[in-house]
Image (cartoon, rainbow, N blue to C red):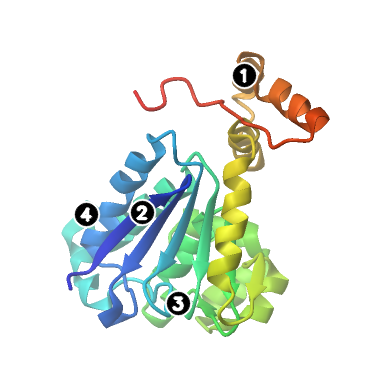
Amino acid sequence: MEPQLTHTVTEGVATVVIDHPAKRNAMTPAMWRALPPLLAKLAADPSVRALVLTGAGETFCAGADISSLDASAEGGDGPQRLSVLAEEALAAFPRPTLAAVRGYCVGGGAQLAAACDLRFAEEGSRFGVTPAKLGIVYPASSTARLAVLTGPATAKYLLFSGELIDTGRALRCGLVDEVLPAGELGARVAAFTSVLAARSPLTQAAAKEFVAGRTDRIAHWEDEARRSTDAAEGVAAFLERRTPRFTWTPQGAGE
């Protein structure tokens, strides 16, 4: 089977699968190129309320396909630029994103996982940022994102050494948000993303921008809150002891 990204949308949750099992789901240039337009397509679908990124089988992603690294001589379409474009597209996805990690999450795989809002991992998974093993300068944007997640000391440990860390250390340093026993990751991800899909997308969208440090759109979100009926619906549902039916969508979504 050719290396590919597959996706499904079920009950408001899009699942994108990195599928290259012959090389532990390593990302080829074609796969890096395919991710931004796929994310744009899913972002334009108002039925998508959350997104899960995972790997086929028992590995999340072992990084970039090393056999493709010679393509770095091709200039602006080299693997590192492609990986950064894919990472930035994932970080900019307007709904909550979650990386569901089994097995190895290394190199470009860790880069993608760090670009998600949240990361849940199965016990026994291994994480590493390995450019020092290849003499590659890790992108500035990726380095900054890693340091925000883990703190400067852990980011330096990972980048300087290229060593792999286990789920216990990943949880302690903030690289992972939850660790699940073997066999329980899928059910926990399904349950949690069901919760995300039921919450106010207005709250989530604004919070995502604010947490990222954006202060240029405060007036925009104040206008969106006035336009939306989500707050009235949330209060009514609370008083009536029922599940709220939030209906806010970004202006222009789905057009």
Please give the label number shown on residue 8.
2
**In this view, 69 is above or below 242:** below
As measured in the structure, the alpha-carbon distance from the residue carrying label 2 to the one carrying label 1 is: 29 Å
Residue at x 58% of width, y 82% of height:
182
Is there a contact, CB below 8 Å, between mark 2 and mark 3? no
Percent x, y for residue 160? 54, 77
> How many callouts does the rendering have?
4
Please give the label number shown on residue 130.
3
Percent x, y for residue 234? 72, 29
The front one of 7 and 204 is 7
Residue identified by numbered label 4: 77
Q: Nearer the viewer, mark 2 or mark 3?
A: 2
> What element does badge 2 sit on?
strand
Question: Dividing the image into 4 quarters, which one contains the N terminus?
Answer: bottom left
Query: What amino acid does circle 2 point to?
Result: Thr
Q: Is residue 51 visible?
A: yes
First in residue order: circle 4 vs circle 2:
2
